[in-house]
Amino acid sequence: MALTSSDQYWGELFGDNIFYDLNYSDLFTRMWLNADKAYRKTDLYAFMPKVSQRTAAKYLQQAIDRGLLIEKQDAEDRRSRRITMSSDLRQRIEMYLDYSISAFEPPANG
């Protein structure tokens, strides 16, 4: 029951069926662990180990196109680009984690 509820909440938070995919969950939650970090695209492929690099690149681009991930030029290497989480995505992930924790907590006695 808690797992189903948690999955439904993920869908409600993201609305778009495209993000109702475990690879996005892997990507977003792993990025959230270091939310202030700016990543190279190639570094983010490892956050989606169940898909090919080509598919991971497609998933990243979809998240960028929808504004969940932000792509900017690397200040140190102007030939490269860096990816960060949008503040909206951070908030959604935190809401999801809070909800999931509460869904899996045992009921209070009394």
Image: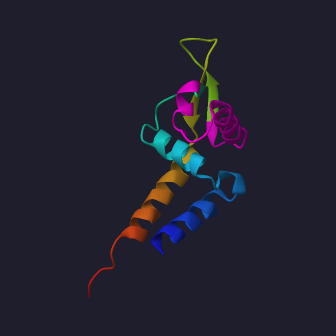
The structure residue drawn at horizontal position 70% and vertical position 36%, both measured from the top left corner, is 58
Q: Quadrant of residue 106?
A: bottom left
Above-or-below relation of 43 to 23: above
Above-or-below relation of 17 to 46: below
> Is residue 91 covered in magenta?
no
Q: Quadrant of residue 79?
A: top right
Above-or-below relation of 96 to 42: below
Above-or-below relation of 41 to 55: above
Q: Is residue 40 visible?
A: no
Point out residue 16 in the picture as x, y percentages from the top left corner: 71, 56
Q: Quadrant of residue 102?
A: bottom left
The structure residue drawn at horizontal position 59% and vertical position 27%, both measured from the top left corner, is 41
Point out residue 77 in the picture as x, y percentages from the top left corner: 57, 11
Range of the magenta residues? Answer: 42-69
Horizontal placement of 62 versus 32: left or right?
right
The structure residue drawn at horizontal position 67% and vertical position 41%, both measured from the top left corner, is 63
Point out residue 90 in the picture as x, y percentages from the top left corner: 52, 47
Point out residue 47 in the picture as x, y percentages from the top left corner: 51, 37
Per the picture, the main secondary structure of the magenta-coloured stretch is helix
> Is residue 68 covered in magenta?
yes
Horizontal placement of 52 versus 91: left or right?
right
Q: Is residue 103 visible?
A: yes
User: What quarter of the picture does the C terminus occupy?
Assistant: bottom left
